[in-house]
Image (cartoon, coloured by chain):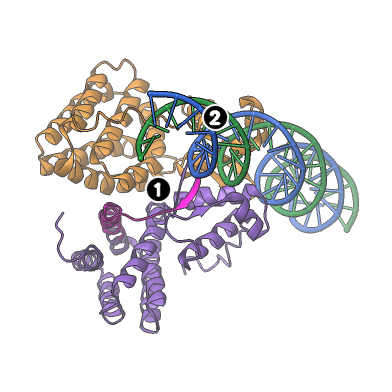
Chain colours: A orange, B purple, C green, D blue
Amino acid sequence: MSDQGKVAPARRRGLADEVADSIREAIFSGAYGPGAQLREVELSGALDVSRGPVREALLKLEREGLVRSAWHRGATVTTLSPDDVAELDSLRGVLEQLAVREVVARASDEDIAAVEKVVDAMDRAADAHEMVRCDIAFHDAVYAAARHRRLEEAWQAIRCQVHLFLLTRIGRSTDGYLSHIPAEHRELATALRARDAEAALALFAAHRRDAFTVLTGTTDEN
Amino acid sequence: MSDQGKVAPARRRGLADEVADSIREAIFSGAYGPGAQLREVELSGALDVSRGPVREALLKLEREGLVRSAWHRGATVTTLSPDDVAELDSLRGVLEQLAVREVVARASDEDIAAVEKVVDAMDRAADAHEMVRCDIAFHDAVYAAARHRRLEEAWQAIRCQVHLFLLTRIGRSTDGYLSHIPAEHRELATALRARDAEAALALFAAHRRDAFTVLTGTTDEN
DNA sequence: CCTTGTCGCAATGTTAACCATCTCCCCGGC
DNA sequence: GCCGGGGAGATGGTTAACATTGCGACAAGG
């Protein structure tokens, strides 16, 4: 009974946000592969909006790291190099470290229940794509439980790139992903529920290392 | 011998970036106090550009946390609450932790020399405002030395807010700031030069705690 | 007196057309 | 084969409008 009075934020969003959502989804669905050009006129025509909102949407996607743009050269879908993956891994590391500390110290039981709810959804996930979505949703829930606006923004800045990272991972090999990952996250949630910071930190670190080695360890050619 | 060939990045910037710089400077100079409204038409008139670049600039400033905007309600200069200060402090903590680790592990001697150069500039700083600018520049140099694109972006996302934070601090009390801070940073640079991760981490933590306690009053535990 | 509903203003959101500038690429000359 | 000029196409930026929305003022009603 903490905050039921908030009937609804109910704030409407701008057209640019919806355009950004459309483009983001198009990228994740594979319509625009890594390195593809995102032309303003083409997008504005396809989405039936003017170039203004499209420009804003591309700016937002650039902030999310999904897109990279250069002066007078337009926007292209980000390609993740091995160095990029290492950067994401290390930055994720410290961000999650803070998140876990905050969750253990200050999260409400409802927040942790929300995290466990995502784990439940994981058990029901059918294919790898759905599992990736749940994986991201799990971390979303953890950051939300930390109740730390700027930390969540920092996560948002790499969230889509991590999504891309996971998509690449399941493209490489889905062995063990569908079966091991739910149990791994269940342990994570349990440690958070028990407010056991040390155990949670160790589990999160192992979780990240798993994904990292799968992607960089086996075949490193490229 | 590493990268002297880079005569200059020399890439041109958009109008929006310059507009953002103007507005940012106006905010730091006090022309727009916390909570002030930033009207598009007013800014576009004052800077003699159209509304397009102004909108982009405001978006960029929002990404930097200097400005907050809501649907159909325009942009207002950010006001830092005590909770915000705590958030900045904790996030800065983990970010700097990663930065120090990366610097100790991978920074070149030139990078560290750049950090020390900023410390030299600190000794010559006359007033508190100049010192704040050097303080920020010091951290900029450290993050640059880490050679970690995403970490630097995460720092950029809170950099201006930390700047605001320090400005508030010197407004509260300049006692000891001008005298102690240069020495403190000299120690920091020395630890980095010696590649002593443990010492550097401890010094950075102490540095942050100093600023934090000055601003939040006497005692605070978190 | 406080509340509630309406109205109008001002600022933002969005569109369209237009011009300037830049990048890329092809093509011809050397 | 290499280099430079020019055209095509895209982005950057401007302007002028129109649509939408938040908010305060003001008046009517309990």
Q: Is residue A78 visible?
A: no
Q: Image point 60% across, 53% down: which residue?
A: B16
Q: Based on the picture, tell me whether residue B87 belongs to the magenta stretch.
A: yes
Between A83 and B185, the one lying in front of the other is B185
Residue B191 located left or right of residue A19: left
Nearer to the camera, A15 or B141: A15
Q: CA distance from mark 1 to mark 2?
A: 22 Å
Dividing the picture into quadrants, the one containing residue B102 is bottom left
Mark 2 nearby-residue class (10 Å; few <14, some 14–19, many ≥20): some
Assess disc 1: are there few (<14), some (14-19) or many (≥20) residues with their C-alpha within 10 Å of its C-alpha. few
Chain assignment, label 2: A
Q: Which residues are magenta?
A: B71-99
**The one of A44 and B29 positioned closer to us in this rendering:** B29
Report x, y in % for residue A120. 22, 20
Residues at discs 1 and 2 both on one chain: yes
Secondary structure beneath label 2: loop
Number of marks: 2
Labelled disc at residue B134 = none
In the displayed structure, B141 sits above or below B11; it is: below
Residue kind at label 2, given as amino acid type: Tyr
**The N terminus of chain A appears in which quarter of the rendering?**
top left
Residue type, label 1: Asp
Question: Dividing the picture into quarters, in which one does residue A15 lie?
Answer: top right
- Mark toward the start of the polypeptide (1 vs 2): 2
A116 or A32: nearer the viewer: A116
Q: Position of residue B195 (x, y in %)?
A: 26, 68
Q: Chain letter of disc 1?
A: A
Residue at 30% over, 77% down: B174
Q: Which residue is mark 1?
A: A83
Residue B183 in the image: state x and y as whole percent. 27, 80
Residue bearing mark 2: A32
Q: Would you say the magenta stretch is mainly helix, strand or loop? A: helix
